[in-house]
Amino acid sequence: MTLRRLSTRTAGFDAELAALTRYEPGGDAAIRHTVQHILADVRGRGDAALIEYSRRFDASEARSAAELEVPREKAEQALAGTNAVVFRLGTIYGVSDAYSRIRMDLVLNLLTVKAIQHRKISVFGGDQYRPLLHVRDVGEAVVPVLGSDVRGTFNLESENVTIRALAERIAALHPDVQTEFTDLPLQDLRNYRVSSEKARAAFGFDPRLMVEDGVRQIGRLVAEGRVRDPSSPRYSNLDFLRPLLVPERSPLGREVIVPHRFRTGRSAAYAS
């Protein structure tokens, strides 16, 4: 596997990065129309359409839908095989670099911004554990392994922390912040801890950044004015993708093309 590396120290970095991340939405309408047509055809003709499209797009030679199914035994063998590496990441936090989009829908980043802007952190429940991991430690761990012979499934985390303890550690760095804990639970009661011992043993996984490092990074972003509106949809994966996941509809019917109001600076439309 060949990995392409970009360095901020090289000339032309901005142009290379822009070329890699360029997105042209002009084909959205055509793509959506094609996908909708395929889905409708499969619903209408069933297995016959499924086999036809599998032959067209996947070069499949299957003569029945049953032949397209992967037997459980074969799937388990592939998972336990020696030709794949899977990383199960903890809850990410912190800042990756000066160019990437920061996320404010991650618990540490979100609580830190609330502490700085509102001088108050409100926690509902708080006994839920999260396996935390700094985003830079992800890159430091993953990139070297991709070019190695390491295979298997690995959990990656730096520490398991309760939401309550996380809020208290953030407040410790901002003494004037008020922390408020309420026993009333939220709908999100996910509670899990993981171990990275397997990764430590297999390839020396050694995360170096801690909660306090991430809190300080987010604090600097806010102080420098880089994040002017933390509630903006661009900082949340769900809010950012919502207009695409739930397309706008016209009261005149599904065949009417509705302008996509989420994107700015250019016109984009698709059949809703």
Image: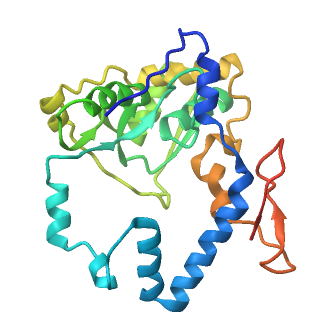
245 sits left or right of 253 in the view: left
* Along the line of sight, the residue nearer the viewer: 219 or 91: 91
**Can you say whether 118 is above or below 268 in the image?**
above
Q: In this view, does 50 lie above or below 103?
A: below
Question: Which residue is at a point 62% across and 74% down the rendered structure image?
Answer: 36
Q: Is residue 84 visible?
A: yes
Q: Which residue is drawn at 41% across and 26% down?
A: 211
Q: How many labels does the image show?
A: 0
Asked whether residue 176 appears in the rendered view, the answer is no
Position of residue 201 measured from the top left corner of the image (x, y, whole percent): 12, 31
Q: As rendered, which of 118 and 247 lies closer to the eye?
A: 247
Residue 27 position by quadrant? bottom right
Q: Is 187 in front, or is 261?
A: 261
In the picture as drawn, the residue positioned furthest to the bottom comes out as 45
Could you say where residue 266 lies in the image, as x and y percent from the top left?
A: 83, 45
Question: Residue at position x 72%, y 62% from top?
Answer: 29
Q: Residue at x 58, y 38 (%)?
A: 104
| Corner quadrant of residue 190 | bottom left
Q: In which quarter of the image is the C terminus?
A: bottom right
Is 146 located above or below residue 271 in the figure?
Answer: above
**In the picture provided, is 244 more to the left or to the right than 108?**
right
User: Which quarter of the rendered picture does the N terminus lie within?
Assistant: top left
